[in-house]
Image (cartoon, coloured by chain):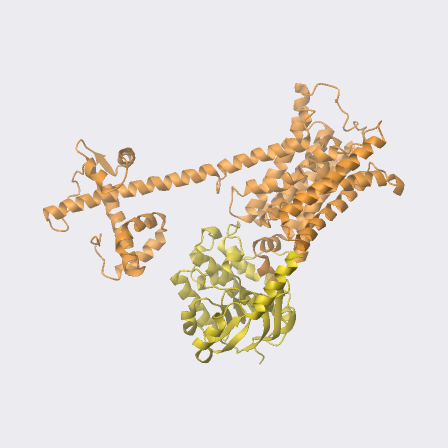
Chain colours: A yellow, B orange
Amino acid sequence: MNAPLSIRDLTVAYHRKPVVWDVNFDLPAGSLVGVVGPNGAGKSTLLKAVMDLVPIASGKIEIFGKPYRAQRHLVGYVPQRESVDWDFPIDAIDVVTMGMYGQIGWCKPVQKKHRDAAKHALDRVGIAELATRQISQLSGGQQQRTFLARALVQDADLYLMDEPFAAVDAATEHAIVDILRELQARGKTAVVIHHDLQTVPQYFDYVVLLNMRVVAHGPVEKTFTSENLHKTYGGRLTLLDEVTEAMRRRERAL
Amino acid sequence: MKRIGTLVVLLFTIFVLCDCAAIAQDIDAPMLETGTTAVDSASIKPASEFWRIIFLQDYNTRIVVLSVAFLGAASGLVGSFTLLRKRALIGDALSHASLPGITIAYMAAPTLGLNSKSLTVLLTGATISGLIGVLAILWIRSTTKLKEDAALGIVLTVFFGCGAAFLGIIQNMNHTQPAGLEDFIFGKTSAIGVWDTKLIIGASLISTTICILLFKELKLLCFDSDFARSRGSPILLLDIALMSLVVLVTMVGLQAVGLMLMVALLIIPAAASRFWTDRLALMAVVSTILGALGGVIGAMVSTIFQNLPSGAMIVLTCSSFFLISLLFGTQRGLLPRYLRRKRVNWRVARQHLLRSMFELIEQQKEQASISANDLNRKAIVSLDSLMLQRTWSRRELLRTLSSASQDDLIRQRESGVQFTQAGYTEAARLTRQHRLWELYLITHADVASANVDRDADHIEHVLEPEIVDQLEDLLDEQDFSLPVPANPH
């Protein structure tokens, strides 16, 4: 069987500044993968590149052996919570049914069975009773759970989550971890961008240390060492950074 | 919700079919020369004519009102999506940038063998230059470091300036007959003819239908375009579709509302409807209705008062709807929000009062060292001791006291106040709930115990009953089974 996510020589650049540089890895199926690195290390960009949301400069990405375009239905995406306007006039169940628009099809209305499925997904993340609440009236943790439910309702095989643990309450954190374990038990793979280094060994069994390039990747026990962490987080401004920054300044001055 | 939307469209369609039949009957009848009626008479029409307009007895009034109703409805609907997509001002750039197109089309038409007064020719020119304007904005934004607002300002004024210059040239060319192009700037509903009506209604129906068919896709686009793209939704196509709808309603609206003010019909009804609801479908319906009403009322007012431009009247009507929504909108209006806050404050004050009284009685009991179940429920609490219990003004306290006694929770005596049976039960419940919270915060949330009281005060008033339930279950497990647990301080 092909790896859930396989990345070869991936480079992504914004305005000539590389954000993700020469990334290579294969993820083992059925694992919980933590992606760890400092701010601006290109973690979100990496996930977005996997889903064709940002143009890639070079490289090849495969989901279960095929390009993303052909495998969309196998991938569930949980974007960063701040990426949307929570003042939008919809309720929680509306957000979750959005995960099924592909199945429902163009121009067709959402039916009861879809709403039931959405309700069930909300129940799995523990906020079924908030289904009809307007999303701005949900707490940060509840909003995050709504996003998680939207990904769960698709029943994907690979989940990509952009900082689901950022600024959530303890109860939500537990709920998300439970869901991750349940997904793993069913043979699914989850790639999770994570900030809290202390909980990495506890939550994940595979880790990718990223700082523009992949510093190290592998099983947590072997890879998540203080030496590797120092390489990832120490020495913020690498030579490459300085060069690109200087070029950008010059370009702006022209 | 979606059904309501469909129903509205259905009703409109029936309305149109009936009226189209009426138009078809009237079409052979000699038509009044549009635009020149009663210009020389007084600016306010006599009362008899006033009623003729209100009851749509004139054929002309009828087609004008019908077409602005459709126009308003369509722009209200399309506008609610552009507002949520945060592209509301694109419509403004589009309509302003259409002026050079209109004037160039007017000048170029004779050489191309077309009728320079044909609306189709003028609107084609308007559409082309409007789109060039929008493209110019996108180009400026992506190639320079200027932000969208600056790009918008530049393009809007430059295009409008060009248009105004061409307009001057046209007026110099033919002194004798005015081209009527100025009507496009502020709008003139009386210039609308039968063919224009069909154009407006057709365009409105098309854009309404597309909005309803793509309702769910546009909703996702506006809420979370990245997620939509990750699901394989063609974001660019949807954005183009939405923009095309804006182009469609803006262009057919130029004549009735005018290019200066057309954008108002796209923004104001949508913004106003947001005050009434937190559901997109309902918001779209309300916005559609407000747009249609604004169009109809505005057009009627401008027909009654001859010299008032219809665009301005439509905008003013819509903005009065906006003002009403801003003040009284049930979801986000200022007044309902103020009242809700007032009600919460009032409830909090009452809860404070009851709990303070309960605690004072408890203290009396402790001083007298009576056994636990022997609380003196009917003990009288003095006002002075209540004043000391919390930081509240005497006026505030007296107001709370009188409202509580009106609800028979307490009785006011000469020496102070006294619980009724109902008041005592309520106070015991509140105190229990409050202490449960305090305990929860102390045991679970690592809050320094000195800060607990004030925190708990705020939390318990905003808590949902079901959370209180959960909390009580949680703490009941830890043998706090007394009706009121002991004060943890």
**Foreground: A88 or A117?**
A88
Q: Is residue A74 left or right of residue B415?
A: right
Instruction: Residue B296: give x, y in percent of width and height.
Output: 65, 33
Instruction: Residue B390: give x, y in percent of width and height.
Output: 25, 42
What residue is drawn where x is 50% and y is 39%? B329
Q: How many marks?
A: 0
**Foreground: B169 or B218?**
B169
Q: Is residue A32 visible?
A: no
Quarter the C terminus of chain A occupies: bottom right
Q: Quadrant of residue B471?
A: bottom left
Instruction: Residue A221: give x, y in percent of width and height.
Output: 43, 79
Q: Is residue A191 left or right of residue B457?
A: right
Q: Is residue B103 left or right of residue A2?
A: right
**Foreground: B477 or B101?**
B101
Quarter the N terminus of chain A occupies: bottom right
Q: Is residue B451 left or right of residue A70?
A: left
Q: Is residue A45 visible?
A: yes
Instruction: Residue B50: give x, y in percent of width and height.
Output: 66, 23
